[in-house]
Image (cartoon, rainbow, N blue to C red):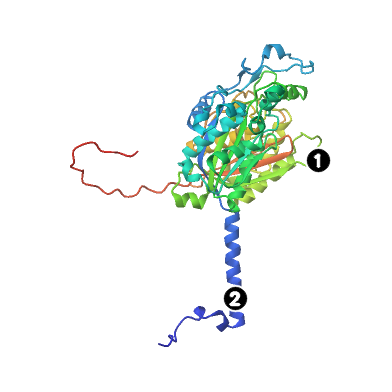
Amino acid sequence: MSAPTNAPETAQAPAALSPLKRALLAVQEMRGRIERMERERAEPLAVVGMGCRFPGGADDPDRFWELLREGFDAVREIPADRWDADALYDADPDAAGKLSTRWGAFLDGVDRFDPDFWGIAPREAARMDPQQRILLEVAWRALEDAGLPAERLAGSRTGVFVGAHNHSTDYARMQFADPEGVDTYTGTGTSHAVLAGRLAYLLDLRGPSVCVDTACSSSLVAVHLACRSLRERESDLAVAAGVNLILAPDFTLAATRMKMLSADGRCKTFDAAADGIVRGEGCGVVVLKRLSDALRDGDRIRAVIRGSAINQDGHTNGLTAPSGLAQREVVRAALADARLEPWRVGYVETHGTGTALGDPIEVEALAETVGAPAEGAGPCVLGAVKTNLGHTEGAAGIAGLVKAVLCLERGEVPTNLHFGALNPHVALGGTRLELACGPRPWPRGSATRVAGVSSFGWSGTNAHLVLEEAPEPAGPAAVQEVEPRKEAGAVLLPV
């Protein structure tokens, strides 16, 4: 049978087309590829699971939110199981061998761990840094929150990205201080690389496994790298985390000499009395997917990461001095990555260390980016979880991220603590920036709500994330009424 004579010309074999038409088809195909690549490069990431353990009993995100709303302050006197605070304390930060603080935000029960659950021998577990143990437990809870059983992840392209401050190596120093006690498990038990590697090993995860140290910005940089890994298709799922414990006084001594610590052990972000940080502990974990995959799989989406960016201060007036220029650049880069205008941001979880120098620089950078007035734009509220938890160092960025996700979910911004009078060097006039001096409702509106999260490292490495509220869930599927079963006896009801 002969071919029909009215077949469309576009169905012809390429060789049968004129050179001009072949060129047009090639251009159209290339344009489609470029558009697809651009969509993939900018694809939002869904937060499908979260877990946390922060001081004050914030052992999961729901409890963390309850405590934030109550205005809890997790800072307390240094517990006796860490070190003898009275013996080491001296109010003079120049006193040799002494600490100028007796305060911190500490987790309880960091020595508790169930090795049998993980199939780890008790002898090996005893050599494992408690940071490894806590990370395993919180990551497991985050995967549970995401509805992802461990057996489904074995062999998958799941990446693990963990932020940890290099000075949280107290457990290693404790073991090496007793050379006769060092054994075959000490090396892996105290390696920061194994923070990520052990989780990947135990769950048989085959994506990237990375531990990041950029000091205070470590965990938010880890989230940024996780987002990039998902967009580049090297991972199909990502676990991003940060963890920090303070088991010995060593780094607190160094912080004393640097005069970084608040005299009264309180983080007074944006306040006229701001005088330094208070150290804190904690762990936070988020489970991330590409948004298209999460929608396809019917996942519960807690929030969406629209964009992220990292950069470096470069040469400033001091190695650890913050750079307002670099902070402005990283916020703008994250907004560009998110394809969002600055006026869309209604809340920023700030780095907010509560230092006389850092707070004004951060506010000035936000005023020149997301804080500029715009027609139809509402206020942009500034939050600071460090006023609740202290500075959790390697886990600081993830603590801010977990709080920001909860604010988007619950439609409210909790109060910043320890605020009495505005730092005279912080200028809010002429901007749309406002401080969370009391609980602030943040309900859904005609436009989706957008939040920013900042984290800056004393290494000079800065990170900023742009979040958006989760899309409205699809309506429930129609339920078909079924005639009740007539059989007598027990019935199994799966939950």
315 left or right of 171 in image: right
Q: Quadrant of residue 189?
A: top right
Q: Which mark is residue 24?
A: 2
Categorize mark 1 by other alpha carbons within 10 Å: few (<14), some (14-19), many (20+): few
Disc 1 marks which amino acid?
A: His
Residue 126 versus residue 486: which sits nearer the camera?
A: 126
Res. 261 in view: no
- Distance between the alpha carbons at the discs numbered 2 and 1: 50 Å
Q: Which residue is mark 1?
A: 315
* Residue occupying image coordinates x 79% and y 16%: 96
Is residue 73 or residue 360 the one in the foreground?
Answer: 73
Return the x and y of residue 205 as percentages of the image width and height.
55, 44
Label 2: how many Cα within 10 Å (few below 14, some 14–19, many 20+): few
9 in relation to 30, above or below: below
Q: Nearest the camera: 156 or 239?
A: 156
Which badge, 2 or 1, is on the more N-terminal residue? 2
